[in-house]
Image (cartoon, rainbow, N blue to C red):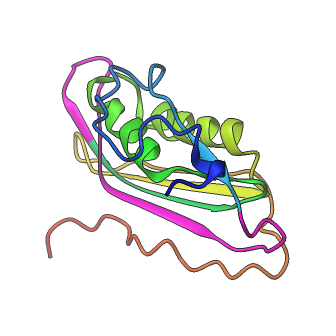
Amino acid sequence: MTEERYTGLTQLGGQSDMPASPEAAELERVPNARAEMDYVVRFTCPEFTSLCPMTGQPDFAHLVIDYVPDQWLVESKSLKLFLASFRNHGSFHEDCTLMVASRLVELLSPRWLRIGGYWYPRGGIPIDVFWQTGPVPAGVWLPDQGVPPYRGRG
């Protein structure tokens, strides 16, 4: 039995095609049943991929997204498809990371959001990209993102 608050979802519960691009990906949201509470939702994507816009070579990152929801939660299957849509998208590390954050902020209007983009080295230099909407709300328990800085082998 599907609850009425979930009736607008188009991707959950069935076959969904991979979006051709991040712009074509449809992020979906569901009502937050605990909107009166401040709590953190974390999504970890250790196998994020995109393409270098200059060479077309693949780039790899470990993304960690933390947010304190207000009225909406992101539907996780739509988020997974959105993140996967970057596989054929050419953009620099900074732009990819901030594009993910911007789309989520636009969709959810969360009380707070941060993203850590831990990019694996290309040309010997890892690039880490961090952004957040503002100060962490008072009283919110926020664990470390748990991704150590790149140290190479050994």
- The quadrant of the picture occupied by the C terminus is bottom left
Residue 89 is at least partly visible in this image: yes
Q: Residue at x 74, y 52 (%)?
A: 110
Q: Is residue 70 left or right of residue 87?
A: right
Q: Residue at x 28, y 37 (%)?
A: 15
Q: Residue at x 37, y 39 (%)?
A: 81
Q: Nearer the viewer, residue 141 or 120?
A: 141
Q: Nearer the viewer, residue 99 or 9?
A: 9
Q: Based on the displayed image, in which of its 4 quarters is residue 93 positioned?
A: top left
Image coordinates of residue 136 in percent, x first then y, are: 77, 68
Image coordinates of residue 13 in percent, x first then y, are: 37, 47
Image coordinates of residue 144 in percent, x first then y, are: 54, 77
Q: Which segment is the magenta one? A: 33-59
Q: Based on the displayed image, in which of its 4 quarters is residue 142 positioned?
A: bottom right
Q: Residue at x 40, y 70 (%)?
A: 147
Position of 49 relative to 143 (above/below) = above
